[in-house]
Amino acid sequence: MFRIGLIGLRASRPVLLKPIQRPQLLFRPVSPFTTGRHLFQKDAHNDHPKKDAENKPENDKEQSNEMVKKDTTFDQLPHIPDPKAEALAKKNGYVPAKEWVRESFEMPKTDVRRPHMLKWKALDGHGPKLFALAVILWIIWCAYMVTGRGGNEGGETTLANNAFVKYKIVKKMKISDDVELIEFKGPERSMLQPKYAEYWDGHRMFSVHIRQPDVQVVRSYTPLPVYMMQDVDGKDPLVKIISWDTDYNGFCMIIKKYENGEVAKWIQSLPIGTDVDIRGPFIDAVIPEIPADVKPPRAPMEDMPSRIPADWKYLDVPKPDNLVFFAGGTGIASVLQALLSTNPPRGCVDIHYSVRTRDEVPFERLLYFLQKLGRIRLFMYVDKENKFISSKDIPQPAPLNIKPNTDTTDYNNALEQAAAQKKDKNRQGPVYAYVCGPDGYVNYMAGPRTYDGQGPVKGLLGQKGWTNDNVRKM
């Protein structure tokens, strides 16, 4: 039993087998200009015969000798030169390496992220810089919109009385031989600058300055809130009132050419598309306030009078006072500006208009509409027809109106209301008078102007009892 046990122990011992150690193989240097060469050789630097003999059995040596046995299959093949390859190698300075160096590379890992995530990978770490840049650009944009830097003096894009703004001539219409209607268009308004409609107030008449850059001369002209539609078939363009719902930066001016008027001649000679320096507005006259001004303003004039609503009844306040304008030549522009703007005069306006010929009368269509609405009464004096204004045509000043309205009728529109008021025999006379025109006309009607633009009231108005308290020279 004991012997059997020893045999069992001997048989259960594990047998340790040495792994077969193979010699290291290296790529043999091969010239790019040779074809048949053996590719493997035994590593001479790592060959230790003595050490291998001690660790390897004899059969392993024989097997390794067979694997490193020189292959002579391609030794007898001739060398085939390649002139193009040799020339290219010499040209590029290519020198074959003496020994081959084996290198290994790893394939880049595939990024499984979505494409839009890969685009932002390059911006990693630049978030604060990009945010700061966006804030700076926003500040610059706000400064531009607030100041309106657009190549004008002071950066204004709307009318400014402290700097000239460039307005472009967009349309021209000939009224007579020496009178033209010219439309000007300004740049776009900046964000925080006032809207263009705010300049037009019928209770405040203003003018603008136009500069002649060659001689540095400035002249005053009265802008009108109208524009010219495109002419059709060679006819004169239709003049229409600016719609107050739109923010249109443009206006028209009546330019009359005088013999000694250098600025007017220069303006009329400019072609369409020319920029003109304009500065303003400068207030010429203000209509005094009346108790009826506490009511909403009067509806502005429109190209279709039938759409204009009726005026307020003024049952609890005195009726609006009436006015009178004496205009000569292009001086009618001031009263037209007041009548065609927003918040026009509430009372009726008598216009005494002196002109050389009827061909020089502008806006006949709009004047006709204003008469139908009962907002004006037009008296014309034409030189060519030997009809001149005289003392008998001048009304006397009327006192301020203190009586409220007694008409309680509801009218459908302003035309119906004007037709009913035309029959009123107790119509009030004008309370305030305004004189506008050339110097000779103003001197004849109300006396010469002084350094402040006014002076004592003389002439025809002075003979009728008008004074500086109710007369304004423009």
Image (cartoon, helix red, strand yellow):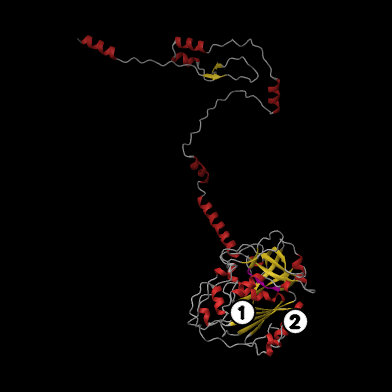
> Residue lying furthest left in this view?
1
Query: Which element is circle 2 on?
Result: helix
**Nearer to the camera, 317 or 53:** 317
**Nearer to the camera, 206 or 374:** 374
Q: What kind of secondary structure does the magenta stretch mostly adopt?
A: strand
User: Based on the displayed image, in which of its 4 quarters is residue 271 positioned?
Assistant: bottom right
Q: Mark 2 points at which residue?
A: 440
Work out whether residue 162 can be spotted.
Answer: no
Q: Which residue is drawn at 73% across and 84% down?
A: 444
Taking the image as shown, residue 127 lies to the left or right of residue 263, namely: left
Marks 2/1: CA–CA distance: 23 Å
Query: Which element is circle 1 on?
Result: strand
Amino acid, disc 1: Val
Amino acid, disc 2: Gly
**Nearer to the camera, 13 or 265:** 265
User: Based on the displayed image, in which of its 4 quarters is residue 69 positioned?
Assistant: top right
On residue 349, the disc is 1
Taking the image as shown, residue 45 lies to the left or right of residue 96, namely: left
Q: Quadrant of the C terminus?
A: bottom right
**Residue 315 appears at what percent x and percent y?**
48, 81
Figure check: 114 above or below 195: above
Residues drawn in magenta = 220-225
